[in-house]
Amino acid sequence: MNTRLPVQLLICLIGLAVISSAAAAPPIVENGNPAVENNDQLARQIGRLVGQLTADRAADRDVAEKQLLELAGQTTATADKFLALLPKDSDQMPLALRDRLARIRRQVEENVSKSATAGTMVTLAAKNMPLADVLKAVESQTGNKFIDNRDEQPDPGQKGVTVSLDLKNEPFWPALDQILDAAKLGLYAYGGEDALSIVARPKDGAPRFGRAFYAGPFRLEVLEARAQRNLRLPSETSLKLQLEVAWEPRLRPIALSQPLADVQATTDNGSQLAVGQPDSEQDVEIPNGTQAAEIVLPFKLPSRDIKKITKLNGKLRALVPGRHAKFAFPDVAKAIGKSQRLGGVQVTLKEVRKNNAVWEVHMQLTLDEAKGSLQSHRGWVFQNLSYLVDKDGKRIENAGFETTRQTPNEVGVAYMFDAAERLDNITWVYETPASIIEMPIDYELKEIELP
């Protein structure tokens, strides 16, 4: 017997389901997109356009798909609301409709990920504005946090410093460099928190603005050039450039990779410096709480008549979380075997068992496209948050974990909890990046003085 519903009846049922699912959802508003000012309106539009995805004319189907993507917006909140209202795949759906809906979901997730990893912008009209107010304005516009640590230093620098600047839609890093130069302050990128630490600048410290290369949310600068010569083995010489790669603190990259074959240095006499170990690759894993990493670029030591590198070109790769997701499994003891999916990640609660006085929560994380992040850069997975929440809202942190499974796109972990005798009415929560993006960073730094 053919149990598939007629297409038109199915579309009507989908539209009703979409509208009813919006009734209990909180309203959202996205500036510049009046089509999503309330959930009922959004649900009606989704239902109508999903129906149009089965139109006879291909042009009508394409228009409906384009308009659905426009409804999804670019922000995480709007996209999540849209995806919650978009009909789920069903065996009752025509295959062409299921393919369209799957493509729309993938595109929405990709758009949100790109938006989340793009550089932010700053607009500021400051005239003798206190530094604290300037930083607060930058925080509100970009989502990047600051900590003023000048009091922790022997020479805390100026107090009561003010800033006068006029910035109009300036990228985050050039804007911040100009602010710090105006205040004669510096940054410390290894403070252990997801924030940039404001510190005093040494009296002979060089300006920041104009010395770096800016690439979206990244800032690159050569901090040091070091020439080495082994006096016993004259053939063993080298020139090493210390490249600092900084990022907006909201970004939290997983790892950086610099293939040395993608680095080229042009000197002041027009020659190219030979790269040391050109077939190798510099890999740096990023621990939590750091906002920069250093990569050493090795070259053959040039002759003494070469005074500077006029251009340093390179291309490195950054593995970056496209967005973060929070998965909650209520009544954890009864949720065994259940899975939840958001974007390109799936979390499965495999098992919950008592081991003496400790509860073990066994889970599995699966990435559709791991981008090598689970094969060569697995450490970020073990920095994901896993905790229990009791019926009173009290959070119970895990007391440790052990790995139970490792494949190129899956990781299994058993988390240990000192919790109540029973797990009734207790929720397990897991927070993780919902997608991993490989971002290429092409850079060019100029006028690097050699020792």
Image: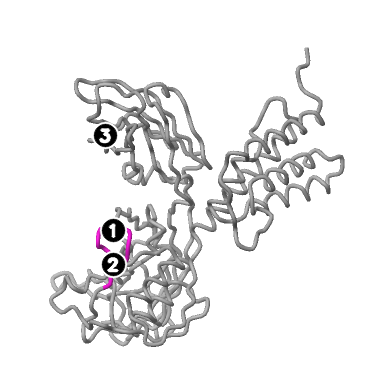
Q: Residue 193 carries which label?
A: 1
| Residue name at image x 47 percent, y 50 percent | 323
Q: Residue 447 carries which label?
A: none
Label 1's element? loop
Check disc 3 and report the residue beneath it: 401
Quick one: 442 or 87, which is closer to the camera?
87
| Residue name at image x 69 percent, y 25 percent | 91
Q: Is residue 449 above or below residue 195?
A: below
Separation of disc 2 and disc 3 at Cα? 31 Å
| Residue name at image x 50 percent, y 57 percent | 116
- The overriding secondary structure of the stretch rendered in magenta is loop
Check disc 2 and report the residue beneath it: 147
Left or right: 225 in relation to 78: left
**Colour scheme employed for the rendering of this structure:** one colour
Where residue 196 sits in the image (x, y, percent)? 32, 66
Name the amino acid, label 2: Ile
In the image, the segment drawn in magenta is: 190-198
Where residue 395 sits in the image (x, y, percent)? 30, 39
Label 2's element? strand
Q: Is tag 2's residue or tag 1's residue first in the polypeptide sequence? A: 2
